[in-house]
Amino acid sequence: MVVAGASSSSSSSILGIASGFFSRALHSSKTSSGPPTAVHGIHVFHCPDVVGIVAKLSECIALRGGNIHSVDVFVPENKQVFYSRCEFVFHPARWPRDEINNDFMKLSKLFNAERSVVRVPYLDPKYKIAVLASKQDHCLFDLLHRWQEGRLPVDISCVISNHVRSPNTHVIRFLERHGIPYHHLPTTPRNKREDEILELVADTDFLVLARYMQILSGRFLESYGKDIINIHHGLLPSFKGGNPSKQAFDAGVKLIGATSHFVTEELDSGAIIEQMVERVSHRDTLQSFVQKSENLEKQCLAQALKSYCELQVLHCDTNKTVVF
Amino acid sequence: MTLLRRTAYSSSASSSILQIAGTFFRAPHSSTAAVAGSTYGVHVFQCPDTVGIVAKLSECIASHGGNIHSVDVFVPEDRRVFYSRSEFVFDPARWPRVLMDNDFSNLSKFFNAKISIVRVPDLEPKHKIGVLASKQEHCLVDLLHEWQDGRLPVDIKCVISNHERAPNTHVIRFLERHGIPYHCLPTSPGNKREDEILNLVKDTDFLVLARYMQILSGRFLDSYGKDIINIHHGLLPSFRGGNPSKQAYDAGVKLIGATSHFVTEGLDAGPIIEQMVERVSHRDNLRSFVQKSENLEKQCLGKAIKSYCELRVLPYELKKTVVF
């Protein structure tokens, strides 16, 4: 109610400004050599709930000529926590990038936010990720191909594997062609090469475990400190651990699935980001279980990464996520 | 391999079958034959796999003027077991019910079948069932309404509950109106009233546990001896036992489901018949988890019972089912 009241008088002026930029942007984007005039921004916010947050956030954007295109707000029934995600377009000349940071920082302090992140995909560097894989290729391939097609907005700084791949394999040739280093770090029960991995990934924003079959220790997780996304080829919490396709096949289930989740110290137990299922029947063999499962894993991991990069995934409680 | 050879066999036999059947295909043009050849029968068969089963089964039906409308055959990749389900129409004047039983019985002996069941819905009594429920009504009520609408082809002999229901409740009035006895058998940790239940259901063909919250003992299962179908409000094997909706909610899953399965001595561990899922998100609270779950349970149990009555469900290995 408060939000609508506050912005209705200013919205017409925002539209006036923004439409001017839109029309110029549309007409001029192809001919101008500089950036488009209207730029897309995303802001996510997580703070203790109180009256007036949406009003202040939207006011902040509007005052700088930003036009909000999408808002998701979520306050759980029984907890005084506030989550929001806004998409807006703005003009960098009018609202420079570092000032955006300052403005949201002030709001963050005002509301004692647990998290306040703003991202301008056009101006900010892409997320830097490292991908860890073992012997199974399918998730790694799919990820690399999506990245090549521009559908995964990340910078892959390296691929790390405990499995050796010879120079004439598809993966190695692909990585060479794109100048992405491949680090082969074979593991043993006693040596998980964690220190070497930590050094290789020190500069990344998050990690992707694309069927990496080693368990990362609590020490590694603390040292790395940033998010790690894993794909598990089963519908958690069913079939944790190894060979979930076979576990599912033996259990006679009629639905199989894949789960992508954040990595925590406990195996396959972190906050779930995305889950997908497919039907199976008596006509399925272990092989078709595995094939359907691999198909689901690729889709599920890709969807989770996409959501994460677009700032749609927020941690909620200890083991859950908000996915806008 | 065997399946392929079987197809080769039946292709030579099939032309003669088609010839025989062809004369009956013409039959619908004559008014008496149209009515006569339209009684519907279902036959299911399970035996050790060998060449020639489909040929013999279809020949048996055709030689009595039966017209096969649908056949499902399944032979697992790695085991020499044969499963089939045939639907056919026939003329009882030409193929009396008793003779039909004999004919299939002969084939059953010939192939050393583990299962050979023929059912002619129009000529036989419906499956007699007992329904057990506890306090939660939604599955029971849905089942009763489906039955009333003629969509559940069973005879409900009685409803047994460990929960009392007053005379003016919907369930009690419904049952009275339809002359179905309601037996309230409150249970205690020391007394599950199993002998009384056994006595009440001894005349039934199978039992339905529609959210019956007591565990039936191995002794009960042995004594009753026939199939018991349960609905579990979770996606087995996740969340066995009590309050799976809350377990799922606490686990932060993005998909919840229901599972209907045969009852065995292990809790929620018998062969699965049907599973269904629905998406949930951060916007769901425990209440909507429960509501979505209840909706799924009703559908899932209904589907399982229908499949079972239509002879689509066959046991497969120790813990699985074939569902044609």
Image (tube, rainbow, N blue to C red):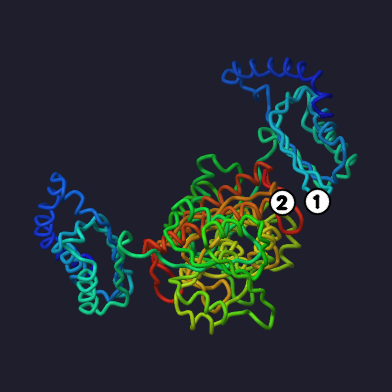
Residue A208 locus on image (x, y percent): 61, 55
Label 1 crowd (10 A; few <14 / some 14-19 / many >=20): few
Residue position marked by numbered label 1 in the rendering? A78
| Amino acid at the residue labelled 2 | Asn
Query: What residue do we see at 33% from left, 69% from top?
Result: B76
How far is disc 1 from disc 2 in space, using C-alphas?
9 Å
Look at the image and tell me whether residue A239 can be seen.
no
- Do the residues indicated by labels 1 and 2 lie within the same chain of the protein? no
On the rendered structure, is B273 left or right of B119?
right
From this view, report whether residue B319 is shown above or below residue B9.
Answer: below
Q: Quadrant of residue B69?
A: bottom left
In the foreground, A121 or B199: B199
Residue position marked by numbered label 2 in the rendering? B285
Residue that sits furthest to the right in the current view: A110
Element marked by disc 1: loop
In the foreground, A127 or B260: B260
Look at the image and tell me whether residue B191 can be seen.
yes
Residue B91 locus on image (x, y percent): 19, 58
* C-beta proximity under 8 Å, tags 1 and 2: yes
| Amino acid at the residue labelled 1 | Asn
**Picture disc at residue A20:** none
Element marked by disc 2: loop
Residue A141 locus on image (x, y percent): 49, 53
Chain letter for the residue marked with disc 2 in the picture: B
On the rendered structure, is A155 left or right of A18?
left
In the foreground, A324 or B85: B85
Residue B95 locus on image (x, y percent): 18, 64
